[in-house]
Amino acid sequence: MHTDGGIILTEPFFLKPYFQPKIWGGRKLETFGYDLPEGKIGECWAISAHPHGPATIENGPLAGKTLAEAYSDNPEYFGNPSSKVFPLLTKILDAEDALSVQVHPDDEYAAIHEHELGKTECWYVINADPGSYLIYGHHAQTHEELVSMIENGQWDKLLRKVPVKAGDFFYVPSGTIHALTKGIMVLETQQSSDTTYRLYDYDRTDDAGNKRELHLKQSEDVTIVPHVDPKLDITTEKIGDSTITTFVTAPTSPFFSVYRWQVNGELKLTKSADYTLISVLDGDGTITADDKTFALTKGTHLLVPSQIASWTINGKLDIIASTPGKEA
C-alpha cells in the first residue's frame, strides 16, 4: 500500500469531464446529468489528460489536480509507466449532425508531423436513430484511385456506409477513413491525441460563413489502401447474473483493451493492467475498493489506480471499461 505524507492513496479517482463545443454537436449529453456550457456541445472528454481538454480529479488527496498533473506527479498510481503522457482518452460524442469525414495518423507519422501520439480509436454505440449509418472505410483499391476520387469529389463512390444500431462496436485503427453521422451517440476509447485530418466536410460553413479547414495531403498520406475491416474476436462471459463482454484486446489492439460490464447484483473484479478506466452509461450502484465504498451513477467516470488489486461493483449498471495496452 503506497502512502504519501501519511495519506493512503488507494481509492479510485472520480473525474470531472471537460466539454467541447462542436459545429455538429447538440444537447443530448445533458441526459447523463451533466451541466453543459451553452451552445452545441459535441464531446464530453470524460477521462482525459490531453492539454486540449483536461479532466479534473474530484476526490481524495489529489482533488483539484488534473489527470495530467496526477500522471506526472504520482507515476506510482499508473504502474510507473514509461510513456511521458497519459496514453488514453475516453469521450462521449453526441452527433446531432454529421461529423466531417476524417482519418487519423499512426504514431510514426504523428510524431514527425504533429509532435503527439497517433490516433487509433474505437466506438461503443450508445444510441442511434433508426436508419443511422457510419462512414467506415472506403472503396478505393489503389492509392492512385483514392487520390483521383478525392480530387474529383467522388464521395458517394469513395465512401463506405455501414448501418449502425445501439450496442454495436467498431474498432477504428489509424489510417481508417471514418465519420459518425446524424443521430448517433458513442463512447469513444482512443489514444490521447487531438490530431484529425479532415477529408470532406459537406461544404458546410460556420456561423461566420467560413468553411472548416481540410487536410487533403495528410489524408492521402495516411489512409490505408485498400480498406480491410479489422477481425474482432468479441467474447462474452457470464459471472453470476452479470455479463462481461470483451470487445477488443491485444494483439488486435496494441493500445487498449475495451470491455462492457453489464452488472446485475455483485460483480467482483481484479486488475488486469496497471490501471482501469470506468465509464457508467446507465444505472445506479456502488464500487468498493480498499474497504471504501463510492456511489456510481449514470455519467460517472473514474480511474482505478495501480495500487488497487481488486474491487467489487454492486447494483444494476451498464459500464464501458478500458485498460492500457503494451504500446500505450
Image (tube, rainbow, N blue to C red):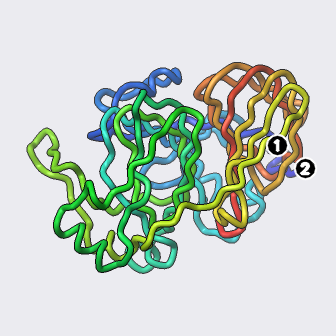
Taking the spot 82% from the left edge, 43% from the top edge, the residue there is: 10
User: Callout 2, which amino acid?
Assistant: Met
> In the drawing, does residue 175 fall left or right of residue 291?
left
**Sequence-wise, which precedes: disc 2 or disc 1?**
2
- Residue 53's place in the image compared with 139, above or below, is above
- Residue 63's place in the image compared with 50, above or below, is above
Q: Can you identify the residue that label 1 sits on?
A: 10
> In the drawing, does residue 201 fall left or right of residue 45?
left
- Residue 293's place in the image compared with 301, above or below, is above
Taking the spot 47% from the left edge, 69% from the top edge, the residue there is: 116
Q: Residues within 10 Å of mark 1 (few under 14, many from 20)?
A: many
- The location of residue 323, given as percent across then percent down, is 71, 53
Q: Nearer the viewer, residue 58 or 120?
A: 120
* Quadrant in the picture for residue 301: top right
Disc 1 element: loop
CA gap between label 2 and label 1 equals: 7 Å
Q: Can you identify the residue that label 2 sits on?
A: 1
Q: Nearer the viewer, residue 125 or 296?
A: 125
> In the drawing, does residue 207 fall left or right of residue 315?
left
Q: Nearer the viewer, residue 71 or 312?
A: 312
Where's the C terminus, which quadrant? bottom right
Examine the rendering and report whether any part of residue 146 can be seen. Answer: yes
In this view, the residue farthest toward the left is 209
Taking the spot 40% from the left edge, 27% from the top edge, the residue there is: 36
- The location of residue 200, given as percent across then percent down, is 25, 56
Examine the rendering and report whether any part of residue 66 can be seen. Answer: no
Q: Residues within 10 Å of mark 2 (few under 14, many from 20)?
A: few
- The location of residue 79, given as percent across then percent down, is 78, 60
State if disc 1 and disc 2 touch (CB < 8 Å). yes
> In the drawing, does residue 212 fall left or right of residue 232?
left
User: Callout 1, which amino acid?
Assistant: Thr
Q: Nearer the viewer, residue 99 or 133?
A: 133
